[in-house]
Amino acid sequence: MNIFTSVIFQIAVLFSFILIGFILCRLNLLPREASTVFSRLENRILMPAVVINTFRTNCTIENITQKWVFIAYSAVILAFCVLVAFIVSRFLGKTPYLQKIYRYSIAVSNFGFVGTAMVSGIYGADSIELFDYLMFTLPLNMFTYSIGIAWLVPNGGKVFSFKTFLNPIFVSLFIGAALGLLNLPKTELVTSVISSAAGCMSPIAMILTGFVIGGYRLPELFKHWQTYVVAGIRLVALPAVVVTVLKLLNTPQEIIIATLCAHAMPLGLNTVIMPSAYGENPETGASMALVSQICSVFTIPTLFFIFGYA
C-alpha cells in the first residue's frame, strides 16, 4: 500500500466514525449529555488502557537499549516543537486555557491512531519499521500523557502541581512503564481486558468528536483563523523544517521516515476529549480536528513526495 492510498484509507476510517457521531447528534439518537459520558469514559478508562498497553509492550529495557537513537532523536525534535508551541500559542489564544489548547495542538500531532495505522498499513503489522516507529514515539507518548494532558486540564494554574498530574492517564503511564521495565508476570485475562479497552479508544474518541461537531453549525467550525495557523504549522511547517535539517545532517533514513509519520499527522483528538471531560467548550478542538483531517489528505502525501519517500 503506497503513502497516498494508506493516508486516504486511514482518514476514511476516521471520518466514518466521526460521521456516525455527527448523525447520532443531528438525529437526536443520543441525549446531549452523551458527550460528557463519552469523554469521561475516554479519560478514565479507555485512554489509560491505551497508555498501559503501549508502555507495557514497548517500554522495556531491551527495546530502550536497542533503539535509544530513535528515542534520543525523538526527544530533541519534540523539544523543538514544544518551544515553537510556547512561542506561537501566546499570539493565538485570548485566554490562558485557549493558549494551552493551541500549545498542545502545535506540540504533538495524532501520531498514535493515524501515524501508527499508516506505518502499519505501509510496511505491515509485523515489520521492523513499525517497531522502530513505536520506539520513536515513546517520548511523544510520555509527553502527551503527562505534561500534554496537564495542559488540557482546566484551572491547572500557571505552575504545574502534583494535583494537576494526578489524573488517570498520567497514573496509568507509571503502571504501564512498571509492567514493561520490571517484566512483571501478565495474566491472559488482564492482558485481554487492557488490549480490548485500548482498541475501543480511537473509535469512541472519533464518535465523540463527530457528536461534538454535530452540535455546531459546520460553518462555525471553519471560521476560526487560528485553526488554519495551527494546522499549517503542525501539518506542513514543523515537519518540513525538521526533516530538512535531518537530511542536512545525514540522519539515517529510518529516523527521517519515523519523523514524518509522527509529526506530519493531523491534529489529535485530546483537545476534544479533555475539555469535554471537564465541562469546557470543545469547539476549538473540534474545529482543529475537522480542518486538519481534511487538509492532511493532501499534505501528508505531498510531504512524502517532496522528500522522496512516496
Image (cartoon, grey):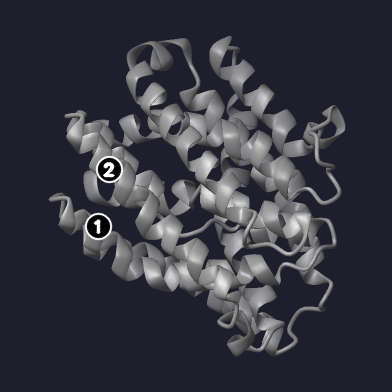
Name the residue at 56% across, 75% down. Answer: 225
Horizontal and vertical percent for residue 112?
48, 46
Nearest the eye: 269 or 226: 226
Name the residue at 56% across, 53% down. Answer: 88
Among the two numbered marks 1 and 2 on one chain, the one whose residue lies closer to the N terminus? 2
Which image quadrant for residue 289?
Answer: bottom right
State the quadrant of the N terminus.
Answer: bottom left
What's under tag 2, amino acid-wise?
Val
Find numbered disc 1 in the image and state the secondary structure of the residue it sits on: helix
Direction from residue 299 to residue 304 in the image, left or right: left
Name the residue at 77% across, 37% down. Answer: 168
Q: How many marks?
A: 2
Horizontal and vertical percent for residue 303?
25, 57
In the rendered view, tell whether residue 293 sits above or below residue 310: below
- The residue indicated by pointer 1 is 303
Q: Which mark is residue 243?
A: 2
Nearest the eye: 258 or 127: 258
What's under tag 1, amino acid-wise?
Leu
State the quadrant of the C terminus.
Answer: bottom left
Find numbered disc 2 in the image and state the secondary structure of the residue it sits on: helix
Q: Which mark is residue 83?
A: none
Nearest the eye: 182 or 74: 74
Q: Is residue 183 visible?
A: no
Label 2: how many Cα within 10 Å (few below 14, some 14–19, many 20+) = many
Direction from residue 102 to residue 6 in the image, left or right: left
Mark 1 vs 2: CB contact within 8 A: yes
Q: CA distance from mark 1 to mark 2?
A: 10 Å
Horizontal and vertical percent for residue 280?
81, 63
Direction from residue 142 to residue 31 in the image, left or right: right
Label 1: how many Cα within 10 Å (few below 14, some 14–19, many 20+) = some
Nearest the eye: 190 or 294: 294
Horizontal and vertical percent for residue 295?
39, 71
